[in-house]
Every structure is written in structure tokens, then in C-alpha cells.
Image: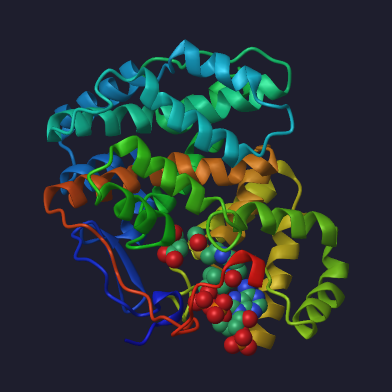
Amino acid sequence: MTATKGLEGIVATTSSISSIIDGVLTYRGIDIDDLAEHASFEEVVYLLWYGKLPNKSELDQLHQDLSDSAAVADEVIQQIKLYPKNTNSMAALRSAVSALALYDGEANDMSPEANLRKATRLQAQLPTIVAAFARIRAGQEPIAPKANVSVAYNFLYMLTGKEPEPIAVEALNKALVLHADHELNASTFAARVTVATLSDIYSGVTSAIGALKGPLHGGANEAVMAMLEEIGSASNVESYITEKLANKEKIMGFGHRVYKNGDPRAKHLQKMSQELGKITGNMNWYEMSIKIEELVTGQKGLKPNVDFYSASVYTSLEIPRDLFTPIFAISRVSGWTAHILEQYENNRLIRPRAEYTGPVNQKYVPIESR
Ligand SMILES: CC(=O)SCCNC(=O)CCNC(=O)[C@H](O)C(C)(C)COP(=O)(O)OP(=O)(O)OC[C@H]1O[C@@H](n2cnc3c(N)ncnc32)[C@H](O)[C@@H]1OP(=O)(O)O
Ligand SMILES: O=C([O-])CC(=O)C(=O)O
């Protein structure tokens, strides 16, 4: 038995949700470029859950269901108020999502219908939790979700209390579409492993949030922004990057386990970053990002991943840095729940083996002899 470090190249499941074939990402067979150009996030949620694009009435129904489910149990809001003010935003999201299960009367109903309803509630309530957390820690009251608006609109509205600009809604919608699913990434795998024990959907999503938090996965978008802030301006990029690479340090937002010739999502985020920079009149983050890309690709052959340009996009939308990864979760919960439902449909416990590398033929030594 020989282990493959990081399970690289191991095919661990079948799935009909999203595919990465020859560097092309599809959701249910539809190219991400096509979806990024045309789809609303809600259409993508439907696509991931049901395997097809919704017709008008199916989409209206999903909008209605998300709208009806967006309010979070008051007990969970009260808990968030008790979190220390400097709580890590992903830790807060992880705890609050875990707590949602306590107030969901169907939490332990494992029927497919109940699981789909819980998926809808999770999709609807993650944005409410993230916005509420951001306001509560700033000493503000949470804002109740608005009825009959998109997930992107509602999130920006609940965060700021103001009607968001159409361009901001459009940009966030596209970012949500681009982040919705990604085959067997680490957080999705964590979700599938958890529910493959026949544990509940809340446990699966809580596991996934924990996995997404790390800087080698979703946490990289926040780390990219921290780097941009540290560098400060385009004139400092070259010395900063050259030194990091010479010290064999990783540049956040670059590289990918699967894509070796570039992440197809990055170009959409790059374009958005440029457009939003022009609109806000602050091109600094975009210009720095372009220069970093030139250097990292030139010196290491590494291309930007989805996390790289999303950092400057969210900053242009005036979203605080530590909400970037929670926003990733707001989108990816659609994919996590699609994978959880798929896992339940054809379940088998996920339990691989380990190649043992420890000592052998040891004997118990009494404590007085150690
Ligand atoms: C949504 C997402 O999860 S996208 C990924 C987000 N994560 C990041 O952006 C963090 C930075 N990137 C990385 O750490 C990696 O590229 C990962 C984790 C994404 C992929 O990792 P792996 O497939 O395990 O590649 P691994 O970390 O083994 O890297 C292979 C080589 O490329 C180098 N490398 C990989 N990424 C980077 C990077 N961002 N900067 C500098 N060097 C890098 C490694 O140092 C290693 O070099 P070596 O062979 O000389 O030791
Ligand atoms: O697939 C991965 O390993 C990471 C990734 O890009 C994602 O989850 O979107």
C-alpha cells in the first residue's frame, strides 16, 4: 500500500455536478464561460441541485423559496452577538451554521425532500449570517433580508443597509456564479466524507466551511488582499515578489492542484477587477495584481487561480477583507449541498487506507520503567 501525498490525481468518486476536463470547467456540462456571461446565481443554484437550467416558473419558485427562507432563527442572531468582537469571520460562520441545525425542526429528517428544503434554507441563510456578523461586530443591528431580490442584491443590502448599485449587484452575481462549484475540491470532499457516514447536511456544510477557511483553499482570497495591502503600490511589486520567490515562499492566489495552464475563472475576475477599478477611480489594486501576475508567471510559470482577482473585485465593492472567504462560502454552499444530495443518493462510507510509516513490534513498557 503506497500513499499519494495529498491524494493528487486520485479519482475518489463519480459525480455529475461539475467537471474539469482539459482545463475546461463545466457545471452540469455547461461551460463556466457561458454561465459567467449569461447566468444569474439563482439559475446556477437550480442547475447544480436539479441538473438542468430552470424554466421561468421554476426559477420564480426558487427565488420565492430563497426569499421565504432567508431570515435566520433569532436564537442564532443572539449567539452571534455573544461572539468576541475579534472572532475570525470564518470561525463565526462555521459556528453559526452549526447552530442553525439546533433550530431546524427537520435537522435529522434524512428524506430527500427534507434535505432539499434544508439545502434551500442553508443557501438562503448563509448570506444573512455573514451580513449579520459583519454588522454586529461593528456595533450595528443586523438588517432583515429583503423579499424578492437576488442573493447578490440581498447580501449587499443586508451588509450596508443601502440599496446597492446595479453594477455592484452584477459583479457580485458573477463572482457567485464563478465560485459555485468545483468538482472535488477540499471543502466539497470534506462535506462528502462527513455525510457519507449518514450524518446530517448541517454537519456536512460545517465541515466544508472549516476546510474552506484555510489559506491553501478559500482563505487565499483574503491572503491575496493582505499581500496587496502590504505591497502598497505597483512600484513595490517587483522587489516584494522577487524576494518572496527567492525565499521559496508561496504567493497567494497562484497555482492550482488541477489547473496547470490557468484557471478559467480567473480571466472573468480579472476583467471585473479592471472594470470596477475604472468605475471607482482606483486602479491601484488592479495594476498591482497585473504586475504580480507577470512576475509570478514569468519567474515560476504559475497562473492566477480564482482567489487572485476576486480580492481586488471585492475590495472595489467596498467589502471588508475578512468577508471574502465567507462570500466564497455563500456561493459554494450551492455546490456543497448539491454534492451532499448526490452523495446521499448513492451513498457508501468514504474510508480510505493509510500507509503505515510508524514503528513496528513495540511492547508496552510499564510507566515506572520509562
Ligand atoms: C479556491 C482555491 O482553493 S484555489 C487555491 C487557493 N490557494 C492558493 O492560492 C494558495 C497558494 N497556492 C498553493 O499553495 C498551491 O498552488 C495549491 C495549494 C493551490 C496547490 O498545491 P499543490 O498542487 O499541492 O502544489 P504544491 O504546493 O505541491 O506546489 C508545487 C510546486 O509549486 C510551488 N508553488 C505552488 N503554488 C505556489 C505559489 N502560489 N507560489 C509559489 N510557489 C508555488 C510549490 O512551492 C512547489 O514547488 P517545489 O516543487 O519547488 O516544492
Ligand atoms: O478545486 C480546488 O482544488 C480549489 C478550487 O479551485 C475551488 O474549490 O474552487
Task: Left or right? Give the position of 95 relative to 299.
Answer: left
**Between residues 24 and 349, which one lies in front from this camera angle?**
349
The quarter of the picture where residue 231 lies is bottom right
Q: Which residue is drawn at 69% across and 15% down?
A: 140
Q: Residue at x 45, y 85 (%)?
A: 360
Q: Can residue 46 be seen in this view?
A: yes
Quadrant showing the N terminus: bottom left
The way the protein has been coloured in the rendering is rainbow
Where residue 121 appears, x then y in whole percent?
A: 32, 26
The quarter of the picture where residue 71 lies is top left
User: Quarter containing ligand 1?
Assistant: bottom right
The quarter of the picture where residue 88 lies is top right
Quadrant showing the C terminus: bottom right
Where residue 337 appears, x then y in whole percent?
A: 30, 43
How many marks are shown on the rendered structure? 0
In the picture shown, does residue 289 fall above or below 59?
below
Where residue 68 appears, x then y in whole percent?
A: 31, 16
Task: Left or right? Give the position of 50 relative to 315.
Answer: left
In the picture shown, does residue 94 fall above or below 16?
above
Task: Left or right? Give the position of 160 relative to 170.
Answer: right
Q: Is residue 370 visible?
A: no
Q: Which residue is drawn at 17% across and 33% down?
A: 110
Q: Which residue is drawn at 69% across and 87% down?
A: 299
**Between residues 52 and 117, which one lies in front from this camera angle?**
117
Where residue 113 appears, x then y in whole percent?
A: 14, 30
